[in-house]
């Protein structure tokens, strides 16, 4: 059987999509968003920012407020029931059916579609091969590890050749080490499938690694949409800057006296620690060896604290008096952000 | 005896704490064991033994009389049939109600409804029987309506239909409670996952909900069936003409002082209830 892994990719277009709960709480402010055909878009934001609600609007499990439209390619799906939208969804807890084996879970969507038993078996085998779980086809769900469950959920979602693939925090339930590994596997698989995909995550590293573009959300609004590098280097708001990696901010008389600016915003790796007398005077309060880098916790003379990531051969020890200046390659954009 | 059994374990077991733990268990379990022996095993053995004796004026023992007498068979089939029907009807009514209550944690009047459901739980069988007479008896609502509309009387209370209504009435509240809790325990994401995979409401119910509820349905069904098999108060109120086993046992015991047959029938009642529950459990487990 040589059915393609996925159908031709479609765009997802959301126009004026808002969601208000029956009690009047606004989960999502009116929002326009286009996911390009074949692209993986990461929805990134803290919990409660509306990213899962947005995902549920796309798959139809929630209905948007009146006035919204959702298109898959040219087709309007706003009023199409979830069971007819042809979306593959990987839920946060995976939601695997406990009364079915691994193979039955993966084949369930095909069974619903009336695919004959033999063709179903082939497709299930193909899907399990794709996620490297062929050997576990007859296992019960409670006999699987977290990582295996995640892959079964993925195989089940793509077995139906969905028009779009939606992943809700697909790696959150796993421990850190496994998450790193599966993140790489997932990125490779998504590229191979070439399917239009929306992935919800609160982990900025995951978003940047998996998403061709990242949409940062906060309090039911879209803060910024762009390629990971753009977001990181040219954040449109302090929230985006802060959410994509650590952002330190220094201000007040000390900063003005030594640097001639009102505020200074920077990421921990963007400053250089130099001998005292040069730059902004500070005191090392703690030093953490991280292998390839050393993390220094520092304080200005007026008590403002900040963090620096420096080369692991840096000599500075706690209580050392040092100077701080922007590293040579530091982008200027962040300073502008800080004053907005 | 328990001590002599524990000693070799002492020698073998090694660790002191584990042993004192085991001995502590024996002490804690002793009252329960004593109660079990005194109030379960002893009377049961006595009852079973009594059934093996011959009633006065008979030569065969009571078990043989019970097995060879069609009247008792009829009584047994009546009881099992009625209990199965009441159980099935209760489950069929309780499942949608339980699903509705579980899926709608807040709606106007829910609290009142829940209180109304709990209210009859404390009623003894006599009161349930009385309620059945009030609704479907000679002076009942049903009969009055029927006389008005068709001119024909409709009286259900004093026969099997009345008993069936009474049983369903007192089985419903507890069954609805059990099934509501079970439906609340179903992970909503399972249903949503099935939905996004294309399953209609009906397919989701059959493929996901029912399998998830098998345990609760079996447990609730077993409770209903066992309760119905042994129910006495309702049937006693509705009239002793109705031929079910608890009434037959009562008759043998009180009216004819036929203790061996009463004992043999009790054993038959217990065994047949157990057999049906065992079959239901095996069926549920094999699915």
Image: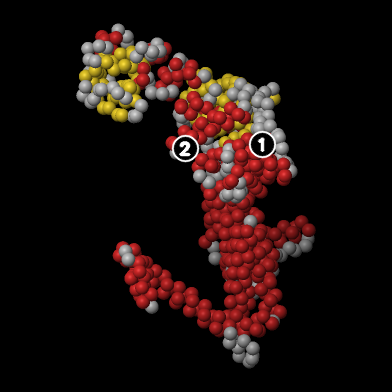
Does B6 sit left or right of B84 as displayed? left
Q: Which chain carries label 2?
A: A
Q: Is residue B122 left or right of residue B10?
A: right
Label of residue A178 in the image: 2
Residue A307 visible, this angle: no
Measure the alpha-carbon separation of dots 2 and 1: 27 Å
B68 or B162: nearer the viewer? B68
Say what secondary structure mark 1 lies in: loop
Residue at the image position 52 percent from the left and 19 percent from the top: A227
* Dot 2 or dot 1, earlier in sequence: 1
Could you classify mark 1 by the number of other residues whose Cα lies within 10 Å: few (under 14), some (14-19), or many (20 or more)? many
Quadrant in which residue B36 is drawn: bottom left
Q: Are marks 2 and 1 in contact (CB under 8 Å)?
A: no
Residue plotted at (68% across, 29% down): A7
User: Pointer 1: what residue?
Assistant: A160
- Residue B237 placed where, x, y %? 61, 70
- What percent of the width, then of the height, locates residue A298? 27, 22
């Amino acid at each position: 059987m040589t059915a393609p892994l996925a159908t031709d990719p479609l765009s997802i277009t959301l126009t004026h999509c808002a969601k208000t709960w029956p009690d009047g709480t606004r989960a999502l402010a009116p929002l326009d968003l286009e996911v390009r055909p074949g692209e993986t878009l990461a929805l990134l934001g803290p919990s409660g920012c509306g990213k899962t609600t947005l995902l549920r609007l796309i798959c139809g499990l929630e209905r948007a407020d009146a006035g919204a439209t959702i298109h898959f390619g040219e087709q309007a799906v706003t009023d199409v029931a979830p069971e007819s939208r042809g979306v593959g969804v990987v839920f946060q807890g995976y939601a695997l059916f406990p009364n079915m084996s691994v193979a039955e879970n993966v084949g369930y969507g095909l069974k619903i579609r009336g695919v004959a038993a033999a063709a179903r078996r082939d497709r299930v085998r193909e899907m399990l091969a794709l996620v490297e779980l062929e050997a576990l086809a007859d296992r019960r769900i409670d006999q699987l590890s977290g990582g295996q469950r995640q892959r079964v959920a993925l195989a089940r979602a793509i077995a139906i050749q969905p028009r779009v693939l939606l992943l809700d925090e697909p790696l959150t339930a796993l421990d850190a080490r496994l998450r790193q590994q599966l993140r790489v596997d997932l990125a490779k698989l998504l590229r191979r499938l070439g399917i239009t995909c929306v992935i919800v995550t609160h982990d900025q590293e995951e978003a940047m690694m998996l998403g061709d573009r990242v949409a940062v959300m906060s309090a039911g609004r879209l803060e910024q949409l762009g390629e990971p590098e753009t977001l990181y280097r040219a954040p449109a708001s302090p929230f985006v800057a802060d959410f994509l990696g650590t952002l330190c901010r220094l201000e007040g008389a000390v900063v003005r006296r030594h640097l001639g600016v009102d505020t200074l915003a920077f990421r921990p790796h963007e400053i250089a620690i130099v001998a005292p007398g040069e730059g902004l005077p500070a005191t090392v309060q703690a030093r953490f060896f991280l292998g390839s880098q050393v993390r220094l916790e520092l304080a200005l003379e007026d008590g403002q604290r900040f963090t620096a990531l420096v080369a692991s051969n840096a000599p500075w020890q706690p209580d050392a008096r040092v100077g701080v200046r922007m590293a040579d390659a530091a982008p200027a954009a962040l300073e502008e952000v800080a004053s907005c | 005896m328990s001590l002599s059994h524990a000693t070799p374990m002492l020698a073998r077991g090694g660790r002191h704490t584990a042993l004192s733990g085991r001995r502590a268990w024996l002490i804690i379990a002793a009252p329960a064991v004593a109660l079990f022996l005194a109030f379960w095993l002893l009377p049961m053995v006595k009852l079973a033994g009594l059934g093996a004796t011959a009633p006065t004026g008979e030569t065969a023992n009571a078990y043989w009389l019970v097995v060879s007498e069609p009247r008792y068979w009829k009584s047994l089939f009546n009881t099992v049939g009625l209990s199965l029907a009441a159980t099935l009807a209760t489950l069929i009514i309780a499942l949608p109600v339980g699903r509705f209550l579980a899926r709608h944690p807040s709606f106007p009047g829910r609290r009142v409804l829940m209180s109304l459901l709990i209210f009859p739980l404390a009623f003894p069988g006599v009161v349930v029987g009385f309620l059945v007479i009030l609704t479907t008896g000679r002076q009942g609502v049903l009969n009055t309506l029927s006389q008005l509309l068709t001119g024909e009387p409709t009286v259900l209370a004093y026969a099997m239909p009345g008993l069936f209504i009474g049983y369903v009435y007192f089985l419903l509240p507890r069954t609805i409670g059990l099934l509501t809790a079970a439906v609340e325990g179903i992970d909503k994401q399972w249903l949503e996952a099935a939905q996004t995979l294309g399953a209609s409401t009906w397919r989701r119910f059959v493929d996901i909900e029912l399998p998830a509820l098998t345990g609760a349905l079996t447990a609730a069904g077993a409770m209903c069936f066992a309760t119905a098999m042994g129910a006495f108060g309702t049937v006693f109120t509705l009239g002793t003409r109705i031929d079910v086993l608890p009434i037959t046992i009562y008759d043998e015991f009180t009216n004819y002082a036929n203790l061996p047959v009463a004992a043999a029938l009790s054993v038959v009642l217990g065994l047949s209830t157990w057999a049906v529950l065992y079959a239901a459990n095996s069926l549920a487990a094999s699915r």
